[in-house]
Amino acid sequence: MTALLGPAPTCALPPPQEEAPPVQRGPLIGVAVVAVALVAVVGSQHGAKFAVLLALGLGLGVALFHARFGFTSGWRQLVAVGNGAGVRAHALLLGTAATLCMLLLASGTGLFGSTPQPAGGQIGVALLLGSFLFGLGMQLGGACASGTLFAVGSGQSSVLVTLLGFIVGSVLYTWQFGLVDDLPTFEPVLLQDHVGYGGAWAVTIAALLAIVAGSRAYQARRNPPPAGRPPTAAGVARVWRGSWPMLTGAVVLAVLAAGVLLVSGGIWGVTSAFGLWGAKVLQLVGLHPELWSFWQQPGQAEQLAGPVLADKNSLTNIGIILGAAIAATLAGVWSFRHRFTGKEVAAAFIGGILLGIGARLASGCNIGAYLGGISTGSLSGWIWGAVALAGTWVGLKLRPLFGLGVPRSDDSIC
């Protein structure tokens, strides 16, 4: 396993890592106070279950930032130059999460009275179209769903535009839900329904090992540039000041994702909250999204009527933003002072809209549909990943139109 997940050949040695700047104490204290206060408020108003979900979100944000763990860059590097290091980290995340989540599902273990449920996504036109648009949108918007949240929290101001587009795209989907609610679809396929949980786990791990081996062979043939390395603290301080190896981040994220399933009974999700946030804003300005057919569905109506701080995905999303801000201030790199061109703003906004629409069509994103699907035995997760990878290829072709870079084989890093 170490040989499979270890470094594969590159055309040059990885660049040396710079020393992390000093801790930004003022911003760190401010964000930490907000985080602690919010956990206390959520716990007092909505109960321990929701406070724990917010705390899990904080942990997810810290891990995402310290490992710089994103799906967008990993797929970009694989498709553009053949560097599969990021994809192999994704495989470790998926395999570890599948091991933990299937144990929870098989045993029916849950906290706070919850019973864990698999993310069985329907298979049909909406899944194919949505995952393709999401893969394309990732490369224009510069981030996936989880990547958008931790980038915003860490002070990457350009990704705020992506987040805004994400919310707009989600609102557009819910507004025009009637156009797509009857697309051809098949019932979900869960591996455990056919081969049991042990068989589903074995099939999942075997498929992931094949992806790891294939990515290593492909990388050896392409001999790509190495990936860049962010600044880091040395010694024990690296634990709380970063940067973590991606493989370490993968394991931590898998444990926390399983924690969300254990506490709430549902998989870790991100994007349904964006549609909720957009609808709440529309209500604040006097509009009535509650009259749209999407929000009149069972479950959706209750979500819109309830408070944001009692919504599972909203809590973990808020936690990710705050957790990433804490991690970035500890690492000394938090800042909203970035310059970007009009073309970059357009790419971020258009990409965000595609991400929002794509995620809703596919009933999830790289977290809810892909990670959640594969880790709980759903065939839809595998389909989502394959089609989103095709969307990534198209997105890379479009990036230069907006002045965005694409890794090249003669680069020093990718």
Image (cartoon, grey):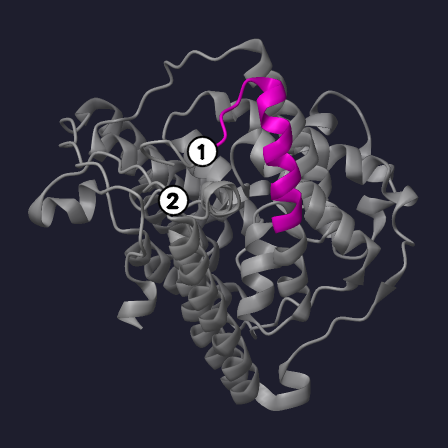
User: Label 1's element?
Assistant: loop
Q: Which mark is residue 240?
A: none
Indicate whether residue 189 is drawn in magenta. no
Give the image quarter of residue 21.
top left
Label 1: few (<14), some or many (≥20) within 10 Å?
some
Q: 262 or 350, which lies in front?
A: 350
Examine the rendered structure and indicate whether residue 109 appears above or below residue 183: below
Q: 241 or 214, which lies in front?
A: 214
Residue 184: x and y in percent read 90, 59
Examine the rendered structure and indicate whether residue 387 appears above or below residue 143: below
Q: Which residues are magenta?
A: 389-406
Instruction: Identify which amino acid the numbered label 2 is placed on.
Output: Pro
Residue bearing the label numbered 1? 408
* 80 sits left or right of 225 in the view: right
* 85 sits left or right of 236 in the view: right
Residue bearing the label numbered 2? 224
Q: Earlier in the sequence, mark 1 or mark 2?
A: 2
Q: Residue at x 67, y 77 (%)?
A: 190
Q: Residue at x 40, y 69 (%)?
A: 96
* Residue closest to the far left: 235
User: Which is the main secondary structure of the residues drawn in magenta?
Assistant: helix
Q: Residue at x 36, y 13 (%)?
A: 337
